[in-house]
Image: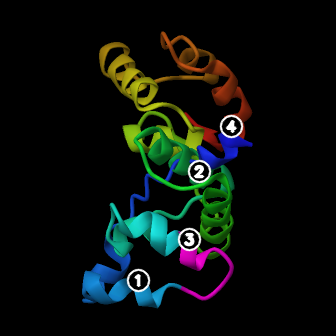
Amino acid sequence: MRSVSRLNINFACAGLLLAAGASTNTLWGQLPDGPGRQETEKLCSGCHELARSVSLRQDRDGWKTTINKMISLGAPGSEQEFAAVLEYLSTHYAAEALPPLNVNKARAIDFETRLSLRRSQAAAIIDYRNKHGDFKSIEDLKKVPGVDTAKIDSKKDVLEF
C-alpha cells in the first residue's frame, strides 16, 4: 500500500481563504473537524500555507495523484498518515461536478489533474497542440508522443474536442 501513501500532496491550495482576507497564520485552525484533520495539518503545513493546500478541489484520484507527487518530492509521513490525509481531503475538499475538459483550450495543469498525467506529458500535449493545431478526436490526442494512452482512455468520458 506504499503507492497509496505515495499519494501526491501537490496541494495547489492558494486562493479561497486568502481571498476572503484571512491570515495564513490563523487558517489552519479553520479546517473542518473530522478524521485526518490532524494529519493534514501536520503534513501540509510544513511546506504550504492552508489556502494553497485546500483551494484545489479534486476527486479522490486527483488527491491521490497530488499526494503521490508530494511524496516523490520528499514529503515526510507514514503510509497511515498519507492515507488519512487522502480520506480527509477527498471528503472535505472534493471536486464539484466539473465541466468536460476541452483539450483544445486546457492548460497543462488541467491535463495533470483531470487526466492524472505527469507534468512532462501535459507539456507534451500543449506543445503538440501548438505545433499541429487543435485535436479533433481522442485518436488525435493519443498521437502525442510519450503520453499515457491508457490514462486518456480511462478518462475519455470527461474529454471534449
Q: Which residues are magenta?
A: 32-39
Q: Is 55 rendered above or below residue 136?
A: below
In percent of width and height, residue 119 lies at: 41, 32
Kind of residue at badge 2? Gly
Q: Secondary structure at mark 2?
A: helix
Kind of residue at badge 3? Glu
Q: Which residue is mark 3?
A: 39
Label 3 vs 1, first from the N-terminus = 1
Q: Secondary structure at mark 3?
A: helix
Residue displayed at 64% across by 64% down: 97
- Badge 3 crowding class, 10 Å Cα cut-off, few under 14, some 14 to 19, many 20 or more, is many
Tell me the distance, in whole angstroms, between the alpha carbons under discs 4 and 2. Answer: 12 Å
User: For this view, does 97 lie left or right of residue 110?
Assistant: right
Do residues under tags 1 and 4 come within 8 Å of each other at their CB atoms?
A: no
- Badge 2 crowding class, 10 Å Cα cut-off, few under 14, some 14 to 19, many 20 or more, is many
Q: Which of the two marks, 3 or 1, is nearer to us in this view?
A: 3
Residue displayed at 62% across by 67% down: 94
Q: Which residue is mark 4?
A: 155
Q: Tell which of 91 and 123 is nearer to you.
A: 91
Q: Which residue is mark 2?
A: 62
Q: Which residue is mark 1?
A: 28
